[in-house]
Amino acid sequence: MTAGNVPPDLRYTKSHEWIRELGDEMIVGITDHAQQELTDIVFVDLPKSGASVKAGASALVLESVKTVADVYAPFDGTVVAGNEALKAHPELVNRAPYSDGWLFKMRRTPSGLATPNLSAAEYEAFVAVGSPA
């Protein structure tokens, strides 16, 4: 099993989300491995701006031709924005999971909990042992 493309500058979760820190905001998406496992994404149920999310809880739902999958919040925080482009073009999650296919931006609660996150090398090793997507 391969992790696919794993940019070294991001952090990863064991539930296959990636996290890009931009100052006090975080951009969250799903990994290349996850989008490959889900196959063609056909709908993204974006979270509402201002919504509170808890670490490890479902932040949004992806629908693919194969299944429906939750995407989990990596931190306690507040949703700042969803990727509105995905409403018309959910396939961006498959085509560009680390750029145009990002899912939502959030601001972490300063004292909030976080799910354990992994470096690129740790995520690749995790996927290599056969973790489910």
Image: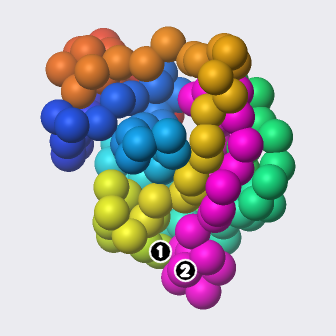
What residue is at 82 percent from the left and 49 percent from the top? 51
Left or right for 54, reference 34 = right
Q: Amino acid at mark 2?
A: Ala
> Disc 1 vs disc 2: Cβ atoms closer than 8 Å?
no
Does residue 16 show up magenta in the picture?
no
Residue 13, how many percent across, how many down? 46, 25
Residue 79, how many percent across, how many down? 70, 50
Give the residue at mark 1: 91
What residue is at 80 percent from the left and 54 percent from the top? 50
Q: Is residue 122 visible?
A: yes
CA–CA distance in space, label 1 to label 2:
10 Å
State the quadrant of the N terminus.
Answer: top left
Residue range of the region highlighted in magenta in the rendering: 65-90
Write down the quadrant of residue 92 in the picture.
bottom left
With respect to residue 87, does 79 lie above or below? above
Residue situated in front as seen by the camera: 53 or 70: 53
Q: Identify the secondary structure beneath mark 1.
A: loop
On residue 85, which mark appears?
2
With respect to residue 54, does 42 lie above or below? below
- Mark 2 or mark 1, which is nearer the start of the sequence? 2
What residue is at 64 percent from the left and 23 percent from the top? 110
Left or right for 40, reference 113 = left
Residue 16, how many percent across, how many down? 46, 34
